[in-house]
Image (cartoon, rainbow, N blue to C red):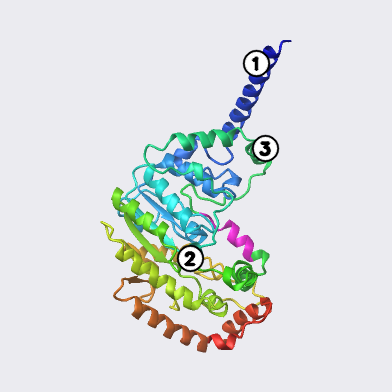
């Protein structure tokens, strides 16, 4: 066999092999990258959608072309329902495009992608302190090439899908998908995460209080204290400028494309705020919130966004945590100190979108949710400080448990008494 013929045969074999791999992966489509079923939403039979949420949701969002998207962290991914009457009453076809542990850059790119895919008229975006950390990295399942940058940017994502479909990694995922046994779905077709994962965590950790303690230690206390002080969460760059470039990009994209924006600070449980306080992050948390609000209103968008604050120490965020050893009781608003339940998501949507009928049906507490402006940001901060002091006096055992957790995890224990 001549060298030319050998090379030709080898090339044909290679192309055929790649084509066979690509066709196999496209048929199984473990990540929902090309399936026509994606036009109806996420295929809840695909178990790996939860592992690769960023990739799957990006592809499905572009096929659905929703008029409204929900963006943010895993709190929003679980708690905010695209089918809420608060949204459907306004004529929105919504999709939950939130990702767990998302950075503000990932939120910006997801919003940019949703706009580029067409039909977007509104977006609700969670503002998360950790997302603005200058050292926050993109997640492993964030494939930049899948996210469009403009209406004409279709070739680059198509080539990225082709690359993924012909990869050995995707072949492994396809085989794993075929081998997996049917299990309760972790996602709704509209992108919202179900209770499955959260309920299993609560059961694994011996009840809600165990879930609170584990969440606080694993998500915040241990990772933050493991870093030297200069590498701990910070939204300022070394030159002192705030990490607001991606927020500015979101505002600019919305203004150019006539998309209405709503932002909100999530109602994490009071114990998480106490965790931040014990870690010495409270002043930075206050400064970050103040910076984000003032920057957003000063940016000069054509359509002024709304910013809502559900955080602090209100009647919702101070809900009583079940006692140690109680493995059966569940809270109405929380899985643990960081993750809120769908009930609170319904309250958030009812407040922001002023659904009086839904507010009445849900018995929305009057102290839950404040619309922030530069004019009331200082008064809001002062109110939260007063409520925080009141909570510490009325819940000394909760505060002591949080402080003890931080002290135990510290290499050099923090003088918590100095943080009061």
The vertical placement of 308 against 153, above or below, is below
In the image: residue 202, left or right of residue 241:
right
Q: Is residue 360 visible?
A: no
Say which mark, if any, is on residue 389: none
Residue at image x 36%, y 68%?
Answer: 293
Q: Are marks 1 and 3 in contact (CB under 8 Å)?
A: no
Between marks 2 and 1, how big is the CA–CA gap? 54 Å
Give the labeled residue for mark 1. Answer: 8
In the image: residue 370, left or right of residue 330:
left
Give the labeled residue for mark 2. Answer: 237
Tag 3 secondary structure: helix
Mark 1 Cα within 10 Å, few/some/many (few <14, many 20+)?
A: few
The vertical placement of 408 against 256, above or below, is below
Q: State which tag comes first along the sequence, 3 or 2.
A: 3
* Quadrant containing the N terminus in the rendered view: top right
Closer to the observer: label 1 or label 3?
1
Give the labeled residue for mark 3. Answer: 175
Most frequent secondary structure within the magenta stretch: helix
Residue 125 is situated, as x and y percent measured from the top left of the image, at 41, 59
The question of residue 200 being in magenta is answered with: yes
Closer to the observer: label 2 or label 1?
2
Mark 2 Cα within 10 Å, few/some/many (few <14, many 20+)?
A: few
In the image: residue 162, left or right of residue 89:
right
**Residue range highlighted in magenta:** 193-202
Residue 14 sits in which quadrant?
Answer: top right
Q: State which tag comes first along the sequence, 1 or 3.
A: 1
Tag 2 secondary structure: loop
Residue at image x 36%, y 64%?
Answer: 350
Residue at image x 33%, y 44%?
Answer: 119
């Amino acid at each position: 066999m001549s060298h030319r013929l050998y090379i030709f045969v080898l090339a044909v074999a290679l192309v055929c092999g790649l084509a066979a791999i690509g066709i196999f992966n496209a048929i199984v489509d473990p990540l929902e990258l090309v399936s026509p079923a994606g036009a109806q939403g996420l295929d809840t039979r695909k178990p790996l959608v939860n592992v690769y949420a960023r990739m799957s949701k990006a592809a499905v969002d572009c096929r659905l072309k929703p008029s409204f998207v929900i963006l943010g962290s895993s709190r929003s991914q679980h708690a905010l329902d695209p089918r809420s009457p608060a949204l459907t009453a306004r004529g929105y076809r919504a999709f939950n495009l939130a990702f767990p542990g998302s950075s503000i850059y990932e939120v910006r790119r997801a919003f940019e992608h949703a706009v580029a895919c067409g039909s977007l008229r509104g977006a609700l975006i969670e503002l998360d302190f950790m997302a603005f950390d200058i050292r926050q990295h993109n997640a492993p399942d964030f494939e930049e090439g899948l996210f469009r940058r403009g209406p004409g940017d279709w070739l680059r994502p198509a080539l990225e899908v082709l690359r993924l479909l012909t990869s050995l990694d995707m072949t492994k995922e396809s085989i794993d998908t075929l081998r997996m046994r049917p299990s309760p779905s972790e996602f709704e077709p509209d992108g919202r995460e179900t209770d499955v994962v959260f309920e299993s965590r609560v059961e694994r950790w011996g009840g809600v209080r165990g879930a609170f303690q584990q969440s606080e230690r694993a998500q915040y206390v241990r990772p933050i204290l493991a870093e030297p002080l200069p590498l701990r969460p910070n939204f300022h760059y070394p030159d002192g400028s705030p990490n607001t470039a991606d927020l500015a990009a979101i505002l600019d994209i919305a203004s150019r494309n006539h998309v209405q924006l709503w932002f909100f600070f999530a109602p994490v449980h009071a114990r998480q705020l106490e965790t931040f306080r014990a870690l010495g992050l409270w002043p930075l948390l206050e400064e970050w919130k103040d910076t984000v609000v003032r920057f957003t209103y000063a940016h000069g968008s054509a359509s002024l966004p709304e910013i809502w604050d559900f955080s602090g120490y209100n009647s919702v965020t101070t809900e009583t945590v079940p006692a140690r050893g109680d493995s059966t009781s569940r809270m109405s608003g929380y899985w643990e100190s960081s993750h809120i339940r769908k009930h609170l998501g319904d309250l958030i949507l009812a407040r922001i979108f002023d659904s009086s009928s839904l507010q009445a049906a849900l018995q929305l507490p009057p102290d839950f949710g404040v619309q922030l402006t530069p004019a009331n940001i200082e008064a809001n901060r002062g109110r939260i400080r007063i409520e925080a002091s009141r909570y510490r006096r009325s819940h000394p055992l909760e505060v002591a448990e949080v402080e003890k957790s931080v002290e135990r995890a510290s290499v050099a224990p923090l003088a918590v008494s100095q943080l009061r």
